Image (tube, rainbow, N blue to C red):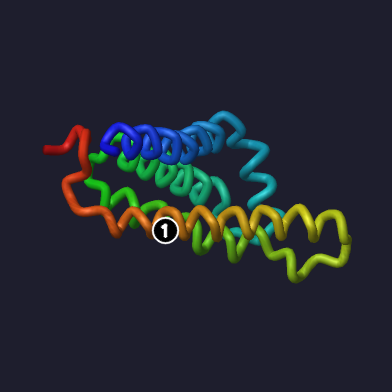
Amino acid sequence: MDTLLLIARIVFGGWFFYNGVHHFLKFGKMTQFAKTKGVPFPAVALGLTGSMLLCGGLSIACGVYPLVGIALLVAFLVPVSLVMHTFWKLDNPQLRRADRSSFLKNMALLGATLMFLALPLPWPLSLMP
């Protein structure tokens, strides 16, 4: 079971880490998108959220300061879901469906992130003793 949990942590944390990298690789495009959603200081917000994803993902994958990693991911998922994926405001059915899908994905990720709180610390096979 320890190995299964490690694999799950690597896959889960790796998904967030990959998306953090994507924030920085597509910084200009993503900053413009955040601007269209009314995000104040979109470049700063994107840098902050990209860093949260990188650090939170690594934390979960490696088991290093996992409570900090969980907090970072929760602090990312809640406001980003409510600000960037406002499907309830959209009239276009296709855009509404796509945004609703992203919102619901984030809610599922939020639930999975919170489930990590049920694991006793330290996590097995963590880099943190």
In the image shown, does 123 or 21 lie closer to the viewer?
123
Q: Is residue 120 left or right of residue 70?
A: left
Please name the residue shown 69% across and 65% down the image. Answer: 86
Residue picked out by circle 1:
74
Q: Can see residue 123? A: yes
Residue 3, placed above or below residue 75: above
Q: Is residue 73 left or right of residue 33?
A: left
Residue 91 picture quarter: bottom right
In the image shown, does 126 or 27 lie closer to the viewer?
126
In the image shown, does 55 or 119 lie closer to the viewer?
119
Say which amino acid is labelled 1: Val
Q: Percent from the top left, x then y, of residue 18?
A: 50, 33
Q: Percent from the top left, x then y, of residue 127?
A: 19, 33
Q: Is residue 17 left or right of residue 94?
A: left
* SS type, badge 1: helix
Q: Is residue 32 left or right of residue 79?
A: right
Residue 32 picture quarter: top right
**Which residue, as the protein is rendered here, is positioned at the far top?**
25
Please name the residue shown 86% across and 55% down the image. Answer: 94
In the image shown, does 12 or 52 lie closer to the viewer?
12
Residue 91, placed above or below residue 24: below
Please name the residue shown 47% across and 58% down the image. Answer: 110
Q: Percent from the top left, x then y, of residue 72?
A: 37, 53
Please name the residue shown 62% across and 44% down the image. Answer: 31
Residue 8 picture quarter: top left
Q: Quadrant of the N terminus?
A: top left
